[in-house]
């Protein structure tokens, strides 16, 4: 049986709120680590795109990547649509999911430049695996 908001409100009324905050601080790293262990593997072919959305009244770019089966790989919100933001997004996605074999994207110059930056870093590090751009 789960805890409802009403139950949580009663518990917080009975106890000090700092107890709940302390529990979150103590146990959230363990929950996050367990969630990382249970992460499903993603396919090696990624589809990457960005779109312009509004968040809290502010227009931002939403970078999004899915694998060939449509499972979300990663996403990132950025104030800019440029090479730096695209490189940061690709690096974040690779850090969380490993290297893709192929990335399919639209004709965005920023995304292309971001993947080229990652390929350049791989080359400088002496790694042979390059990301194919389609």
Image: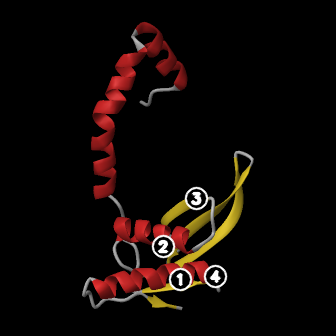
| Label at residue 87 | 2
How dense is the environment of label 1, judged by Cα within 10 Å: few (below 14), some, or many (20 and up)? some
Nearer-the-camera pick, 73 or 60: 60
Residue that label 4 marks: 108
Among numbered discs 3 and 4, the one appearing first in the sequence: 3
Among numbered discs 1 and 3, the one appearing first in the sequence: 3
Residue 79 horizontal/vertical position (percent): 63, 59
Q: Quadrant of the N terminus?
A: top left
Q: Give the farthest residue toward the right.
A: 57
Q: Are dots 2 and 1 in contact, CB under 8 Å? A: yes
How dense is the environment of label 3, judged by Cα within 10 Å: few (below 14), some, or many (20 and up)? some
Real-space Cα distance between discs 3 and 4? 16 Å
| Label at residue 83 | none
Q: State the residue at coordinates (63%, 69%).
A: 81
Residue that label 1 marks: 113
Among numbered discs 2 and 3, the one appearing first in the sequence: 3
Among numbered discs 1 and 4, the one appearing first in the sequence: 4
| Label at residue 77 | 3
Real-space Cα distance between discs 1 and 4? 9 Å
């Amino acid at each position: 049986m789960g805890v409802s908001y009403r139950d949580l409100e009663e518990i917080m009324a009975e106890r000090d709120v700092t107890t709940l905050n302390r529990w979150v601080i103590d146990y959230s790293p363990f929950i996050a680590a367990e969630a990382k262990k249970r992460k499903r593997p993603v396919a090696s072919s990624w589809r990457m795109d960005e779109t312009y959305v509004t968040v809290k009244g502010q227009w931002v770019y939403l970078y999004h990547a899915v694998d060939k089966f449509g499972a979300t790989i990663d996403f990132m919100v950025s104030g800019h649509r440029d090479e730096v933001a695209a490189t940061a997004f690709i690096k974040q996605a690779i850090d969380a999911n490993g290297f893709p074999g192929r990335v399919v994207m639209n004709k965005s110059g920023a995304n292309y430049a971001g993947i080229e930056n990652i390929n350049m870093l791989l080359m400088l590090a002496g790694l042979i695996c390059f990301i194919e751009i389609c």
